[in-house]
Image: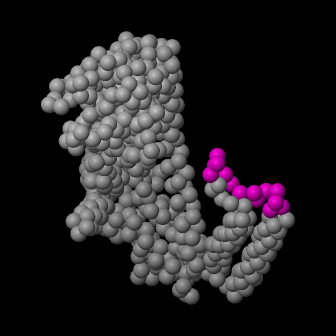
Amino acid sequence: MKKIFSLLFFLVAAQLSISQTANDSLETEVERKLNSLNQQLDSYERLLKQSNQKRKQDSLARVDLMRRIQLLQENDKVSQATLREQIREIELRDSSRNAQQKQRILELRNSTKGHNVEPFGDSLYTIFTKLGPVMAEDRAANVSEKIEILVRDDYFFSDSLYIEEHEGTMDVMYKNLIVTSVSDWDALWVDGESKNTLALIYKESISEYVLSARNRSTVKNIAARIGLVFLILGGVVLILYFIRKLANGVQGWMVLNKAKYFTGFKIRNFELLPPSLHLDVGIRSISVLKWGFYALVFYLSLPLIFGLFPFTRGWAQTLVDWILSPAKNIWISFWSYLPNVFTIAVIYLITSYLVKFLKFIAVEIENSRLNVPGFYPDWAMPTYRLVKFMVYAFMVVMIYPYLPGSDSDIFKGVSVFIGLIVSFGSTSAIANAVAGLVITYMRPFRIGDRVKIGEVTGEIVEKSLLVTRVRTPKNEDITVPNSSILTGYTVNYTSSSRELGLILHTSVTIGYDVPWRKVHELLIEAAVATDGVNVSKEPFVLQTSLDDWYVAYQLNAYTDTPEKMPKIYSELHANIQDKFNDAGIEIMSPHYRAVRDGNPTTIPAK
């Protein structure tokens, strides 16, 4: 027992280790993707700097070319045309460079998730890029916090914000506070706007939002929102009341119609749910649904209430996301999994029809309507069951990769754990199953045969994959494991009786004073007079030994009803006694002879 518990503890620990490894692997994969994306952004930022440097160089070259054109005399048309062609090439390079930058921006936006600036849960704009060492997510969170500070500032006015350039960025300022910064990199990500224009847009957006949020926080608006809260609560109470009335009405209808609709539930002859519990289960189910709707209505009312106030709007969005995000993920997973469902359905349908075809062939062979040389009819159904198991096992192997989570480490760990349990607990069962399979194709007996297995004699009443059941002449059902049958010997009394006839034999000892021909005659008469002996095949007698005081005679008689062996033997022995008594011949034995000392004969009187 200690070893079993130790093994289970080890397997559980291994499973936990596998789960932890899976989590670590997932986190490592996420970090790897994030690092790869950051590397792409850094790489493109370096390319952007190089492109800007080339743009500046081209701009300086263009200015120099324009100056040289102005210095040339009007009659020097050729030189002017050459210089204008060089300017045109610079403009083409600049245009091509801008197109490439836009294309790269589009490619990055398809694989990059932006982060919204969301003060109090209201989305203003999206930040895609980092600024120096600060990541885009942190930039969005910092700007959101600063805008919330502005909303709480009683001295904020519409013209409180201003724009100031600082080290290549345009900063939106409030007093000495940098609310947000706009770089060339940000401008390229927002439809190619210049950073000056984008900074002005952000300034106006932030200013309008702060004033709007402050207006929403006035006493009048707060009072109106509190009134809406009470209105929502009144609606919730009304909805709960109707749900309660509906649930009570359904339960009352169940009680009134219990004799008609709640009569229990059966699967064939098995009563899965008695009538006494059917109604109780229905009423309890309605109660569970009622409380479930109560919880749902209450939960859905919270986002409505929290969404009325700016400072709790983030809570409302969080509560909504707790429902919508799992529902969205479930729907996306279901929709993505539909092709696998169709694949599994096709595999199952093909397997089902293949199994039906195999069963049809097996039934035809079993009923001898289809003859296969070297294949016995009694092999048909066992072979069908074996092939069906293999077909279904192959179906499971084919379906396994399409199951949800089949490639996860947790799924693999559970599969290994179940496999170990089955392996440790089914050693003897597998041995009996293999023995049963071997016995099927050895054909030592069939259902209804009279056999002797070891010390057990009786009729075969059942053959299964694991055991064989024998019914003795005393109506005792004895279960014999198939592995014991395979390692021992089996005597079949029925198989030869169908064609050759089973020979029943018994021995008697008669003294030398009785002629052997007379003994043969009496024994054969006794066999012929016995019911169950096949008289179409003549009984015969063998003299098996010549002993000191008697001769041993063995009577052999044919029968084609081995299931009546005990009764035939009993009647045969009775007939032998009658025939020898009628002839006045004593049946001798060594022990009986030892006490014969001139005593009278023991032959019964008529």
Q: Vertical placement of 595 versus 345: above or below?
A: below
Image x and y of residue 573, in percent: 39, 32
Q: Residue at x 57, y 80 (%)?
A: 311
Q: Residue at x 51, y 79 (%)?
A: 148
Q: How many marks?
A: 0
Image x and y of residue 309, in percent: 63, 79
Q: Which residues are magenta?
A: 257-270
Q: Is 283 inside the magenta-drawn segment?
A: no
Q: Vertical placement of 368 versus 57: above or below?
A: above
Q: Is 435 on the left or on the right of 403, as rendered? A: left
Q: Is 61 on the left or on the right of 333, as rendered? A: left
Identity of the residue furthest to the left in this view:
548
Image x and y of residue 252, in percent: 82, 68
Q: Residue at x 52, y 73 (%)?
A: 119
Q: How is the image coloured?
A: one colour
| Along the line of sight, the residue nearer the viewer: 201 or 410 | 410
Whether residue 592 appears in this view of the structure is yes
Q: Residue at x 55, y 65 (%)?
A: 321
| Along the line of sight, the residue nearer the viewer: 75 or 65 | 65
| Quarter of the rendering containing residue 231 | bottom right
| Along the line of sight, the residue nearer the viewer: 28 or 370 | 370
Identity of the residue furthest to the right in this view:
256
Whether residue 101 appears in this view of the structure is no
Q: Vertical placement of 152 versus 47: above or below?
A: below
| Quarter of the rendering containing residue 256 | bottom right
Quarter of the image containing the N terminus? bottom left
Image x and y of residue 495, in percent: 37, 23
| Along the line of sight, the residue nearer the viewer: 104 or 289 | 289
